[in-house]
Image: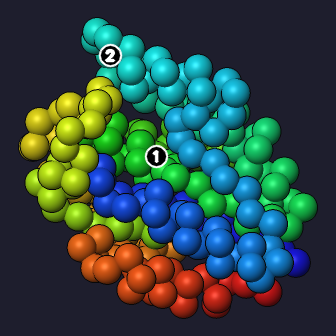
Amino acid sequence: MAGLFITFEGGDGSGKSTQVGLLTEWLESDGREVVHSREPGGTELGVELREIILHRRGYIAPRAEALLYAADRAHNIATKVRPAIERGAVVIQDRYLDSSVAYQGAGRVLGAIEVRDLSLWATEALLPDLTVLLDLDPAIGRERIAGGVYDRLEEEKSDFHERVRASYLELAAAEPDRFLVLDATTSVDELAHAIRSRVVGLLT
């Protein structure tokens, strides 16, 4: 069986973790090997980088932040994702290069093209077979995560998160064959069904 690379994208509170879990259960019940990853933090090195990127107190220059994400991504793809795909596993990952384009390119205003090119270089141009974008109004997302401990990106102001959302939708419009855009306010079961319907067409 051929391997697959499926990524989940969306703003904070969009429900990515829930849908990753449901898709994993469904695939494993069909006898598929499923490998989970996330960015940042999908590997042992990535966990250390995640702590720096998301939880270090104090200022990190935007370009330095983008490079830290790229370093995490390069190592994750080379040591975890590619090997799993090559042996026929389904890799399901929480965030990938589209997050960098949205958060660093648009949110930090570094430029989408430059950030995307950096990620493509870091990953030797690996793109997902499917990217599920759970689209959500940032104000609703903030309500969903209220009461938790915010990381450096979650703490950003509303205009930052509005730029991130707009960037995600632009990316999806530019690559409709790769993206599945879903309204994250839809019920959990309806979202899961829509995702499974799309994944069925990719399984061989």
User: Which residue carries the number 2 mark?
Assistant: 61
Q: What residue lies at 64% left-to-right and 88% top-to-bottom?
A: 200
Q: What residue lies at 46% left-to-right and 63% top-to-bottom?
A: 18
What is the number of the mark on residue 166? none
Residue 35 found in image quarter: bottom right
Left or right of 20, for residue 33: right
Mark 1 surroundings within 10 Å by alpha-carbon count, few (fewer than 14), some (14 through 19), many (20 or more): many
Helix, strand or loop for disc 2: loop
What is the three-letter code of the residue carrying label 2? Ala
Q: What residue lies at 27% left-to-right and 32% top-to-bottom?
A: 150
Q: What residue lies at 15% left-to-right and 52% top-to-bottom?
A: 143
Total marks in image: 2
x then y, percent, for residue 138: 17, 54
In the figure, 72 relative to 123: above or below? above
Is residue 187 visible to the viewer in this orientation of the structure?
Answer: yes
Which numbered disc, 1 or 2, marks the residue that appears first in the sequence?
2
What is the three-letter code of the residue carrying label 1? Arg
In the figure, 7 relative to 69: above or below? below
For the residue pair 120 and 143, the one nearer the viewer reads as: 143
x then y, percent, for residue 110: 29, 34
Asked if the residue under mark 2 is in contact with the one under mark 1, i.e. CB atoms within 8 Å, the reply is no
Q: Quadrant of the C terminus?
A: bottom right
Left or right of 135, for residue 50: right
User: Which residue carries the number 1 mark?
Assistant: 116
Q: Quadrant of the N terminus?
A: bottom right
For the residue pair 41 and 125, the one nearer the viewer reads as: 41
Residue 84 found in image quarter: bottom right
Q: Nearer the viewer, mark 1 or mark 2?
A: 2
